[in-house]
Image (cartoon, helix red, strand yellow):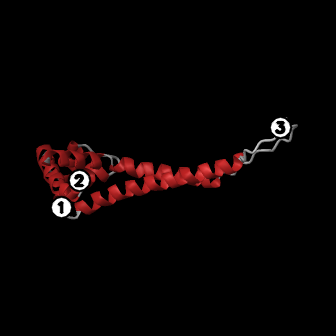
Amino acid sequence: MENNKFDKTEILLNFYIDFRIENENLKLEIEALKNSYDLKSIELSEKTGKTNKISNEIEDRIISNDSKIKKYECMIEANNLIMRKLKNAIKKLTKVEKEVIELKYFHTPILNRKEISTKMSLTTAAIDNVKRRAIRKMTKFI
């Protein structure tokens, strides 16, 4: 069970930057949907029979856009919740653990363990140990 929580936390950390990028892209999609003025000309032609079906293509598109916007907003909120949980979990870490986690998972461009070890003047083995210890501490809060 403990190993499962560790793996879950590490996976979420690995996706942190992806969540940020996805949120930015979803915000762009929402902006595009809000700014799309989709108008189509109406063609009048001879009709062969009456129908009771009431359908307006533009209204359908507006409703569709509104539901897409709500869906995207929910996705953004879900991503934000995960990112806030990860940021909150970091508060329990030591200064060194926090720095390793931030450089490994939150920093762009993403640094590998050798780059982190050079930056922090530690060996790669020490970086791995600090990272594992930090993730174990974080699992309680994720």
Q: Which residue is pictured at 81% across the width and 44% down the height?
A: 42
Q: Are marks 2 and 1 in contact (CB under 8 Å)?
A: yes
Q: Which residue is pictured at 83% across the width and 41% down the height?
A: 43
Q: Is residue 105 left or right of residue 65?
A: left
Pointer 3 local density, CA inside 10 Å: few below 14, some 14–19, many at least 20 = few
Residue 21 x, y percent position in the rendering:
42, 49
Distance (Cα) linking label 3 and label 2: 69 Å
Q: Earlier in the sequence, mark 1 or mark 3?
A: 3
Q: Secondary structure at mark 1?
A: loop
What is the three-letter code of the residue carrying label 2?
Ile
Q: Look at mark 2 in the image and give the residue it sits on.
A: 101
Q: Look at mark 3 in the image and give the residue it sits on.
A: 49
Distance (Cα) linking label 1 and label 3: 73 Å
Q: Look at mark 1 in the image and give the residue it sits on.
A: 93
Q: Is residue 38 visible?
A: no
Labelled disc at residue 52: none
Mark nearer the viewer, 3 or 2: 3
What is the three-letter code of the residue carrying label 3?
Gly
Depth check, front residue: 34 or 93:
34
Q: Which residue is pictured at 61% across the width and 55% down the height?
A: 34
Depth check, front residue: 94 or 136:
136
Distance (Cα) linking label 2 and label 1: 9 Å
What is the three-letter code of the residue carrying label 1?
Leu
Q: Secondary structure at mark 3?
A: loop
Pointer 2 local density, CA inside 10 Å: few below 14, some 14–19, many at least 20 = many
Residue 6 x, y percent position in the rendering:
18, 48
Pointer 1 local density, CA inside 10 Å: few below 14, some 14–19, many at least 20 = some
